[in-house]
Image (spheres, rainbow, N blue to C red):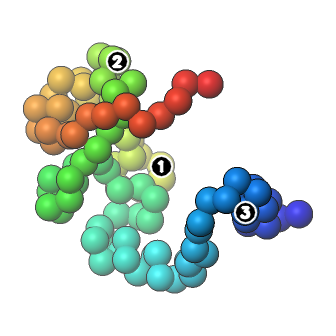
Amino acid sequence: MDTLAKLKQYLERNQAPYEVILHEEVYQEFKDLFPEAEIGAMPPFGNLYNIEVWMDTSLTTDDHIAFNAGTHYKAVRMRYSDFERLVRPRVASFSVRI
């Protein structure tokens, strides 16, 4: 069973409505929003693109944060306090520690 089939089966079993969208649609939407970044490697500076940034509370407890720098092979590491000051993310608890 491929990954998509397994995911569909799980979502249906748990009565979670979903929609399968084509890669090309997602690709174009992200490419339009972040033209200079590789898809999936957009840096979390939504404020540069007029997009609100949300992050989980668990990410605020470390001294540093690291994230993609527009590519899948380069990353930026900086103090969380500087990131918070520059981006002003909305912080909420929406993950579960397992």
Mark 2, Cα crowd under 10 Å, few <14 / some 14-19 / many 20+, is few
Which residue in the structure is indicated by mark 2? 62
Which residue in the structure is indicated by mark 1? 73
In the displayed image of the protein, which residue is found farthest to the left? 85
Residue type pointed to by label 1: Tyr
To which quarter of the image does residue 59 belong? top left
Is residue 85 visible to us here? yes
Question: Nearer the observer, disc 1 or disc 2?
Answer: 2
Residue type pointed to by label 3: Glu
Q: Nearer the viewer, residue 68 or 61?
A: 61
SS label for mark 2? loop
Q: Nearer the viewer, residue 56 or 13?
A: 13
Q: Where residue 94 sits in the image (x, y, percent)? A: 42, 36
From the viewer's perspective, is residue 66 above or below residue 13? above
Residue at position x 39%, y 46% from top?
Answer: 68
Mark 1, Cα crowd under 10 Å, few <14 / some 14-19 / many 20+, is few
Q: Is residue 49 left or right of residue 27?
A: left
Mark 3, Cα crowd under 10 Å, few <14 / some 14-19 / many 20+, is few
To which quarter of the image does residue 50 belong? bottom left
To which quarter of the image does residue 82 belong? top left
Q: Check residue 49 in the rendering and tell me which mark sits there, or answer none.
A: none
SS label for mark 3? helix
Whether pointer 1 and pointer 2 mark residues with C-beta atoms closer than 8 Å, the reply is no
Q: Earlier in the sequence, mark 1 or mark 2?
A: 2
Per the model, the C-alpha gap separating discs 3 and 2 is: 37 Å
Residue at position x 22%, y 40% from top?
Answer: 90
Per the model, the C-alpha gap separating discs 3 and 1 is: 36 Å
SS label for mark 1? loop
Which residue in the structure is indicated by mark 3? 12
Give the number of marks.
3
Per the model, the C-alpha gap separating discs 1 and 2 is: 23 Å
Q: Where residue 40 sits in the image (x, y, percent)? A: 46, 59
